[in-house]
Amino acid sequence: MIHPAGDTTAVGSRATSDAKAPATDGAGERSPLPADATVERLPLSGGDAIELLSVPLSAYGDVTTLATVAAGWVARAVSPAESGTGAGTLLNVPLYGCHVAWSPGRAAVVGPPAKLGQLRESVVEFATREARLRDAEHRLAGLLAGAEDDATVAFAVDERPLARRAGLSARYRETVACRRQLTELAPAIHAPPVHPPTLANQLGERLRDRARLTERLDHALDRADFVERVAEACGQRTADVASARRHLALEWTIVVLLLAQTAMLTVELLTARGGS
C-alpha cells in the first residue's frame, strides 16, 4: 500500500521526514510516495546539488511497485523540452532486488534498509562525476561555437585580430580549464571493474555505462583538443601581427632618426661652408 510521504525538513544538506504531511515534487504536485520515504538535498562539487529519494523495502517488499513510483518521482524533474537529450536523461537500473532511478538533479534508490547507504553513496559519487562532465561539455559547446569566428578574424589584415586578443586569451584559459577538468575525471571514468565486486561498485559501473560517460569523456576531450588548437593558432597569429606592428614601428623610428641625423649633418655642412 502506498501512502503520501512525510514532509521534509532540511537539516544542513540533509532532509528528514518528521512531519506527516503529503510530500510534493518540484512542481508543487502531490507525490504518492511511501510514508517512510525520505528526501535529501545533497550538494555536489561545482555548486550543483541533487535531490535524493530513499525508499526502504522493509514495510512493503514489492520492489516493482515502489520502483515505478520512484521512477515517476524522478521523471517529474525532466522537462518535456529536455526529454531524450543529455540534460534530460532518465536512467532506471534494477540491481539485486534494488532499484535506482536517476536524472540530472534528482535520483531515487529503492532497496532494503541495510543497502540504502551503499546505494546512496554510489549515486552521489556518480552524480558528482556526471555533473562535472556535463559542465565541461556545456562550456566546450560555447567555446566551439566561437572557434570559427576566431579563425576567420585571425587572418584579417586590419585591427580586428588585436582587438580580439583579450577574448582569445580568455577562451584559451577556459579551454585549458576544461581540459584539466576532463583529465581529472578520466581515471575514475576509465577505471576497470573492481574485484571482488560490491553493490556500490556494480551500481556505479552500470550507471556509468548507461549514461555513456566513457564515450562522452572521449568526445569532450576531442572537442577540447580542437578548440585548443584553434585557440593556439589564433593566438600565434595575433602575436605575429602584434610583433610585426612593433617591428614596423621600430623601423619607422630608425628611419626618422636617420633622417633627423642626415638633416643635422646637412645643416652643419652648410653652416661650415657659409662660414668659410
Image (cartoon, rainbow, N blue to C red):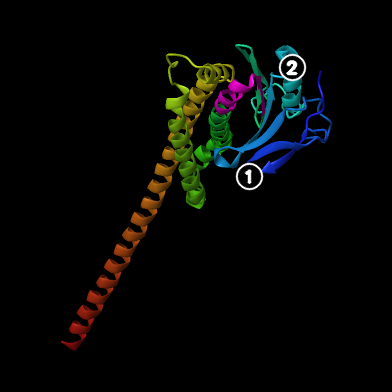
Q: Which residue range is magenta in the image? A: 107-123
Q: Secondary structure at mark 2?
A: loop
**Residue at 55% from the left image edge and 41% from the top image edge:** 46
Q: Is residue 43 visible?
A: yes
The answer to whether 95 appears left or right of 19 in the picture is left
Q: Which residue is mark 2?
A: 60
Dot 1: element:
loop
Of residues 118 and 182, the one nearer the viewer is 118
User: Residue at label 1?
Assistant: 12
Viewer-closest of 124 and 175 = 124
Mark 1: few/some/many CA within 10 Å (<14, 14-19, 20+): few
- Quadrant of the rendered structure where residue 41 is? top right
- As drawn, the residue found furthest toward the front would be 59
Residue displayed at 72% across by 12% down: 64
Choose between 232 and 209: the one closer to the eye. Answer: 209
* The N terminus lies in quadrant: top right
- Between marks 2 and 1 in the image, the one whose residue lies nearer the viewer: 2
**Residue 196 percent location from the top left of the image:** 43, 13
Q: Amino acid at mark 1?
A: Gly
Give the main secondary structure of the magenta stretch.
helix
Looking at numbered disc 2 in the image, what kind of residue is underneath it?
A: Tyr
